[in-house]
Amino acid sequence: MAPRFPPLGPRIPRRRSGVWRGIARGLLQLMGWRVVGSFPDVPKAVMIGAPHTSNLDGVISLLLLTAMDLRAHTFIKDSAFIGPLGWLLRRLGALPIRRGVSGGVIEQSIAALRDAEQLWLLLAPEGTRQAAAQWKLGFHHIARGAGVPVVIAVIDYRAKRVTLLPAREAGPDAPADLDAWLDEMAEHALARHPARLSAPLAAAMARRAEP
């Protein structure tokens, strides 16, 4: 039987917190969740997850990342990094981003990936859990600009499973890439609140259901 939490390759950045890893694994086992597939053994990547329709999505995601010992980062506006809160945010994997400055969020993200020896950047292209009309393609532009793969995680609440799709290369046609990726994601996705599905993923799932 495949392991509930597949091991990471040696090039992937680690949290290296045995206590928290054990707690996260215990909680997920009690809840019945498992991971299917594996992460590519690369030091840098852009990681996205979907569908996002509930606050529980973030909780499950954080528990799974901790259970697998993967250290992923996300960007938060730099004004939040004040005093003890700044220390805590960095400890949890947050990185400061300067909004409204020359270069923009995408360019700063590309620069961070290029400069780092190891960095997995976690992004939410749906942007909201309330039936987004479209996906934000910034994650694709960041991956292509930095020359790193896109890693896709798909959540299924019925099976209590997160499926890791094979790593993808961001090509020159972002909308075409997204359409192809959504079609594959639709095979493994089941949202906690299906009525809140983003329009692109809902359309992909409808296409899959057609005879």
Image (cartoon, rainbow, N blue to C red):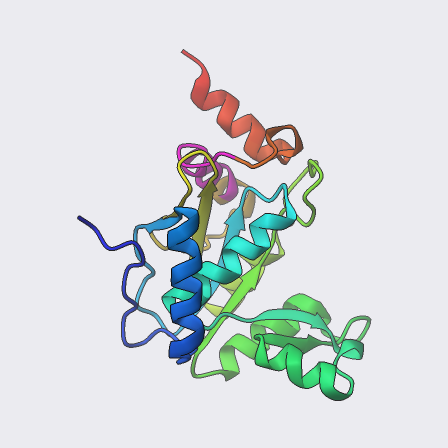
Q: Nearer the viewer, residue 51 or 150?
A: 51
Q: Whole-percent x and y of residue 95?
A: 63, 77
The image quadrant of residue 180 is top left
The single residue placed furthest to the top in the displayed view is: 211
Q: Nearer the viewer, residue 126 or 21?
A: 21
The single residue placed furthest to the bottom in the displayed view is: 83
Quadrant (top left, top right, bottom left, bottom right) of the C terminus: top left
Residue at the spot x=42%, y=55% of the render?
A: 28
Q: Which residues are magenta?
A: 178-190
Q: Is residue 189 left or right of residue 2?
A: right
Asked whether residue 160 is drawn in magenta, I would say no
Q: Whole-percent x and y of residue 3?
A: 24, 55
Q: Whole-percent x and y of residue 109?
A: 60, 71
Determine if residue 25 is in view.
Answer: yes
Determine if residue 14 is in view.
Answer: no
Q: Whole-percent x and y of residue 195?
A: 65, 28
The single residue placed furthest to the left in the displayed view is: 1
Query: In the figure, 59 relative to 118: above or below?
Result: above
Residue at the spot x=30%, y=68% of the render?
A: 8
The image quadrant of residue 77 is bottom right
Q: Is residue 186 left or right of residue 192?
A: left
